[in-house]
Image (spheres, helix red, strand yellow):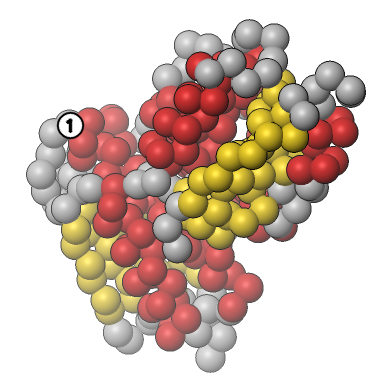
Amino acid sequence: MSTVRLAFTPAPVHVRTARLVGVAVARRAGVAEELLDEVRLAIGEACTRAVALHRQYGLADLVTVEMSDEEQYTVRVIDRAPIEAGLGIAALPPDELTNEWLPGDQLAVGVGFALLAGFVDDLQVRPVDEGIGTVVRMVWPVDR
Amino acid sequence: MELSLATRTIAEHTVLEVGGEVDVYTAPRLRERLVELIDGGAPHVIVDLNRVDFLDSTGLGVLVGAHKKLRNTGRTFALACDKEPLLKIFRITALDQVFPLYPSVKAATEATGPQA
């Protein structure tokens, strides 16, 4: 098993770096080529969500991304925001997404969850084991 | 790849050609350009996504915002896209039921605007 851990200041500019690293590690771990677009999107969504939460709460803590390739490719994106905020709004039906009252950031959170749920078969969102925050855990199969 | 934005006009349609990656970092630039076009009075806006390599929820949020703004003022908004990875994103979020989606700019101009 090998692990790659990346920690970054919660700024939008670094989300692309996390995506690139996440896909590079996935490829090396043996994730099928046709899944890499989904890996890229899902890691990006999870990191975008974490950055948004840190900025919303004025948290300077780093966002952490852990990638490991034990028997499957597992990515954990860890934020340090209060758990009640971490769940955000769930996926909304399209007619509600276009309602005038829904602010852009909330809309993006709802769509982001819809994308995570749609692209990741094995997805888990739960509180961190210690302290405050949420772990978004995503798992993909590897070809060995 | 960085975001690229180019605007051209086809009859009464304003076409915004988007290329590269639309994400949480670059989406504000896309939003600014769309707001400029909408506030500038463009009657029919088509966003061409056929050169986009990556689109996330932030980018989708910007497109939804533009669609709402134009719809509420009696104007039209359409997307040109035939890239399967992007179309899958629209299907998963059910936004394919919200946006008028066409495979090409030509198809979008024929289906929207004054001649439609």
User: Seen in the image, is A68 located left or right of residue A41?
Assistant: left
Q: Nearer the viewer, residue A67 or B50?
A: B50
Image spot of residue B20 (x, y percent): 51, 57
Please name the residue shown 27% across and 44% down the image.
Answer: A51
Q: Chain of mark 1?
A: A
From this viewpoint, which residue is outermost toward the top? B73
Image spot of residue B49 (x, y percent): 64, 48
User: Seen in the image, is A126 located left or right of residue B7?
Assistant: left
Image spot of residue B93 (x, y percent): 62, 39
Estimate how packed mark 1 is, as few (under 14), some (14 to 19) or many (20 or more) residues with alpha carbons within 10 Å.
few
The N terminus of chain B - image quarter: bottom left
Q: Tag count in the figure?
A: 1
Please name the residue shown 13% across and 34% down the image.
Answer: A58
Decide if residue A137 is in sight here: no
Image spot of residue B11 (x, y percent): 77, 29
Q: Nearer the viewer, residue B101 or B17?
A: B17
- Check the image and report above or below for A20 versus A15: below
Q: Secondary structure at mark 1?
A: loop
The C terminus of chain B - image quarter: top right
Decide if residue B26 is in sight here: yes
Q: Hey, what amino acid is under mark 1?
A: Tyr
Please name the residue shown 27% across and 79% down the image.
Answer: A3
Residue that label 1 marks: A57
